Image (spheres, rainbow, N blue to C red):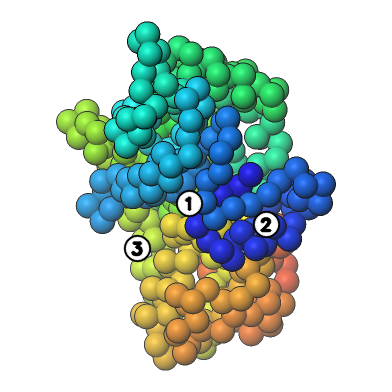
Amino acid sequence: MGTDISEERLRKVASGKLPFVEPGLDTMLSEVVGTGALGVSSVPVKAKSFIVAVPTPVTEDKMVDYRYIDSATDSLAEVVERDDLVVLESTSPPGTTERLAQRILSSRADLGASLGEAPIHVAHCPERVLPGDIVNEMRTNSRVIGGVSLVAADRARQLYEAFCSGDVVVTDAKTAEMVKLVENSFRDVNIAFANELANMCSQNGVNVWNLIEFANLHPRVNILRPGPGVGGHCIAVDPWFLVSADRDNSRLIKTAREINDDRPRRVIEQVLTAVKENQPQRVAVLGLAFKADIDDLRESPALAIATSLAEHLPDGELLVCEPNVPTCPASLAKYKNISFDSLDECIEKADLVVLLVDHKEFVGLRERLAPSVPVIDTRGLLQ
């Protein structure tokens, strides 16, 4: 049984329609809804196992926002019974899973505890999937499970081993929580290094794509590719959980976040300079999603860049193309100088092209453009 607070999302799932783009998941959803294996509800219903997978954003001052976890916990507290299993998948700071367990028990004194045993079993198992390959990675990726108790960890292990062919390892809840934060912070720091190289190369007249290609010829060097920033609900958010938990020992993580958060500004400056030099009538902005070949706009630097360009170029015409989104996002649609166009229209009309996302539809774009049309390629797709 799937539970959500969005009535629109529930209606789509109940009809077997996936509310977002994800290869393979649409077919799977249609099958399980058609056979009655999956139903939906706006409130939790009684079950033996519950998985909580709600957003954990950060506030404006970069502190964790517990509202969604707390709301889901309070809803579960109304239906959970003794010996039930509750697994928190939401990425969380250390101590959140224990906090969830205490919150349920504090509101359900009737559950009680006998002979020192926990009345319910609470564990943490951070999700580890890549948008665009969720079906495969849900089945094959290794999982780390941390229990508030050994019994909770073992119960959760049995649940995940039922569908996960990867290794399922067991630890305590705080370690499991920190594993996900460290994974994404590691990636964020490495992306920041690549983005800082892009900044340096821009100032010194060096082709960053060639630089990285040549440096990576070294057998022990593997520099990532820079981009217009870091988006999504994981890598762009999770490092702040470590920073907020221990500011004294997270200086590198904090600096990496600041470098990546500053990349959109750098790209905007680059575009405005090109506009001043080339005086284009129409600027094509290609891609709005936070990564290639998905429709997810959450925390997307590309969307932020497009919005900022609409504000900076009120007298210009911006041709925006996002092949994975059917209509112009509301945050952009309000600008009169924005038109939401197909790739063919952008190629035909644009005097300047800004490529922000390396969608597969954009491969080979350079050959389709007139040689005189300048391209700002933030992803190195056309190199």
Q: Which residue is mark 2?
A: 13
Q: Which residue is mark 1?
A: 232
Whole-percent x, y for residue 54 in the image = 47, 46
Q: Which residue corresponds to the image point at 44% horizontal and 31% vertical from the top-left?
A: 180
Label 1 vs label 3, nearer the camera: 1
Furthest-top residue in this view: 115
Residue 41 relative to residue 107: left or right: right
Foreground of the two, 339 or 173: 173
State the image coordinates of residue 215 (x, y, percent, origin top left): 51, 34
Query: What residue sits 17% from the left and 31% below the top?
Result: 248
Residue, disc 3: 265
* CA–CA distance in space, label 1 to label 3: 18 Å
Residue 322, given in percent of the width and then of the height, sits at: 61, 69
How far apart, in angstroms, are the residues tagged by discs 3 and 2?
A: 38 Å
Instruction: Give the image quarter of residue 20.
Output: bottom right
SS at badge 1:
loop
Residue contact at pointers 2 and 1, CB within 8 angstroms: no
Which is closer to the viewer, label 2 or label 1? 2
Seen from the viewer's position, the closer of residues 156 and 221 is 156
Q: Quadrant of the N terminus?
A: top right
Of callouts 2 and 1, the N-terminal one: 2
Which amino acid does the dot numbered 3 rest on? Arg
Name the residue type under label 2: Val
